[in-house]
Amino acid sequence: MFAPKRILVPTDFSAGSSAALDHAAGLAERFGATVVALHVWQPPALMRADDAISLAGEPYQTLAEAARLRASAAMDDFLAPLIEHEGLWFRRQLATGDPADAILDAASDGRFDLIVMGTHGRTGIKRMILGSVAEKVTRRASCPVLTIRDGRPSAEAGDRHALQPPASRL
């Protein structure tokens, strides 16, 4: 029987990531596993991570420092529901770079038994342009990957219906 002891939960703080965290927490409670939540920040293409910026009312800092502070606060909020789970062991981790590569590196370096991650469920042109981190991770991971949809209808479903002509009236 498969009994994971270390579970990696990559997060972009979306509803899909929250659903993945819930599933991972359930598995961790059942098997006594440790959950590690990982957020990967990818610097914008036209800026360097060490460029100085100033946000309203704050001193100058590098783009990477600002991103790290915001990601840390978002991670606190993301992990808050786990606090109430008595006996659940969890950690947080922040990384910089290409999300799929950073997730795969973390999974390999941390010797995880399972990756549980949310998926946005993009299809068609959006998937082709934006790509799918979950798909890249699933194809290249050396451990099992469980992908979780957040259960909400996607905007794309609404887009498909919007493109259909209205029913004719007789």
Image (spheres, helix red, strand yellow):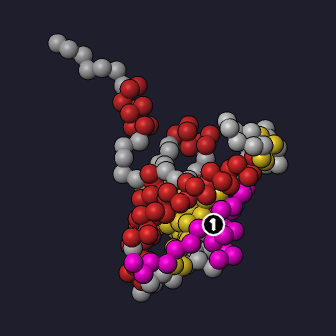
Is residue 124 found left or right of 64 in the rendered image?
A: left
The C terminus is located in which quarter?
top left
Residue under the image location 66 percent in, 70 percent down: 106
Residue 169 higher or lower than 155, as above or below: above
The N terminus is located in which quarter?
bottom left
Q: Closer to the camera, 141 or 77?
A: 77
Horizontal and vertical percent position of residue 118: 48, 57
Is residue 140 found left or right of 25 in the rendered image?
A: right
Horizontal and vertical percent position of residue 168: 24, 16
Residue under the image location 60 percent in, 64 percent down: 38
The residue identified by callout 1 is 93
Q: Closer to the camera, 58 or 32?
A: 58
Residue under the image location 42 percent in, 31 percent down: 159
Looking at the image, the residue that sits furthest to the top is 170
Indicate yes or no whether the magenta region holds residue 104.
yes
Give, as a three-letter code, the residue at label 1. Answer: Gln
Residue 29 higher or lower than 83, as above or below: below
Residue under the image location 49 percent in, 57 percent down: 77
**Range of residues picked out in magenta:** 86-110
Is residue 143 found left or right of 156 in the rendered image?
A: right
* Residue 74 seen anywhere in this rendered image of the structure: yes
Horizontal and vertical percent position of residue 158: 38, 33
* Residue 45 seen anywhere in this rendered image of the structure: no
